[in-house]
Image: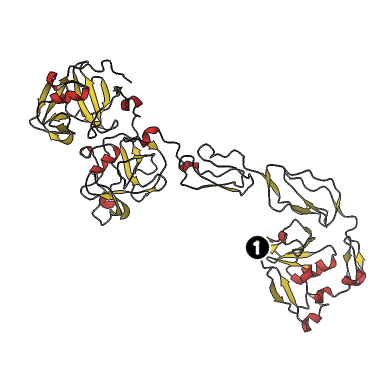
Amino acid sequence: MTFLSLYVVCVLAFIPKCRSLCSKPEIINFSPQGFSLGIGHTFKTFPTPSVFACMEMCISYPMCRSIDLNREIGECRLQVKSSVTDPGLLVSTPNTFHMDKEHFPQTLMDNVCQTLSCDNKTMCRGYSGCVPVLDGKTCGSPPSVPNAGAIPAGPFPVGHTHNYTCNVHYTPVHESYTTCQENGKWSNVLFRCQEECPVHHPDANLTNVKVTSTSIGTTLSYTCHWNKSMTLNSTCKADGTWTSSASICPTAPPDCFDTHDSCWYQFNFAYDTAFNGCPDGDRFVRRTKYSSAPFVGVVLCSPTRYKILLGANLTGTFLNVGDGDGQGEDLCELVGGLEMNAYLPGDYRNAPEMTGYARKYLGEEFQLQPIAGETTWRCNSWYQCAVQIPGTPEPDCMSATPLCWYSFNVWLDNSCNSCNACSGGQIFVKRTNYTSAPFLAVQLCSSTGYKLFLGSSLGGKFMHIADASGTGEDHCELVGGSELSASTGTVYMISSSYFGYRRHHVGEQFSLGSFNEFPRYYECGVPIPGTDIVV
């Protein structure tokens, strides 16, 4: 232990009988300022600011082994224990000096009290001898502490120390001792038994946590069930509860999450909040087709307005996205939407410069680099892509063989009432064989007459279809019919054009573009839903 060295100053007013100190300075060894034995071993307390007065009083009591002096409040405590024999008892205590009797100045120890051999029931009063001031003084039973062991019955002599212990599943807090004092009272009891944390951990359902100890202060390390790349920590708090980290653990995602057409999965991913118009919204993720940014995350303002971000993995931080050839319309592709249906706030000029994902054109891989701010890569605080998120889960049979019809009121382009002869009719949805337009919606006029639409996702807008080399007869292929027996009612818009899907011939992928001629209805010789499975 490190000790301060203080030279004794000759202060005759305090110790008039120790005049030899003036001619022979001694070194007094204190423990570092700010330590004590606490109050659990104190048998006598009295007011004084003087370390010499405190030491002299200790010398006069044979049972005193050390002193604690708090100069701020001017209080001396005489202790029945010493840090020399019990170093583990020394605790940090502000504004307090501790000194063991073994380190008192020899000039103080060389007095008549050292030759009288007084016992612990007495007090040495110099040439008056050993006075039995403690004889017959006792304390009753120690104060009881909830959830601690049984309290022994008194009486107990001055200087007797009781050590508390906690019952099973309780943790000791503060010093566990109390001592019978000269005034017949036990020293203040700060000790308490805190209920330990439960054996069943609150994170058990989502993690592999194992409770190895339930004591206060215990820290456990573990990982999520589904994603083991993160190390989580939980601590048993002083109130007997565990801290929880499982909120960042994903539950096992649905099977569709890892398919080619990944579905949305609610997951509280971490993200860069530097420019987010949807703070504190629900978060969803799904896979992308881009190896440079395999995950897209959205923070919802509403099901149709959201902040779009990209991430390298689920446990990392998702970053903002910049568009180098537009305002970000083509980023709607990431959520299953179309750039022609994008609606943006146009607030990219307010975005600070930050590191994010960037690309110029639809279909390009992304690059990590500075975006927004003074760069040419535009980033918006939110996006509307005519896609509802998370939307309705797709029935399994839509990806099975044979495909089923799904009776679902998808979002149809009804901006032109005269363009749809079957407006208001029942709607069925089915998957197509075309990656450019993976979903077909059919709105019935009757089982054999219907209007056809194509869409990029179930939650997005379904749009009209144009035929660049006919009047739409080859579109009957989408419902299992033949263009040879097809009949269509074509509408020709002179004053306006519409965006939608188009192609020249059967088997071609569809492209997006504008046109002013497309069918109002189809008769393909195929009843819908017919004998197909319907969900």
- Closer-to-camera residue (374/293): 293
Indicate whether 250 appears above or below 369.
above
Residue 241 point in image, percent of width and height: 59, 43
Task: Give the residue drawn at x 75%, y 49%.
Answer: 164
Q: Label 1 belongs to which residue?
A: 94
What's under tag 1, amino acid-wise? Pro
From where the camera sits, is residue 15 visible?
no
Residue 395 left/right relative to 222? left
Which image quadrant: the N terminus? bottom right
Task: Give the residue drawn at x 75%, y 55%.
Answer: 40
- Closer-to-camera residue (406/133): 406
- Closer-to-camera residue (39/503): 503
**Residue neighbourhood size for the residue with mark 1, other residues' Cα within 10 Å, grouped as few (<14), some (14–19), many (≥20):** few
User: Image quadrant of residue 150?
Assistant: top right
Which image quadrant: the C terminus? top left
Residue 465 point in image, percent of width and height: 17, 29
Residue 81 point in image, percent of width and height: 78, 61
Indicate whether 116 appears above or below 336.
below
From where the camera sits, is residue 52 visible?
yes
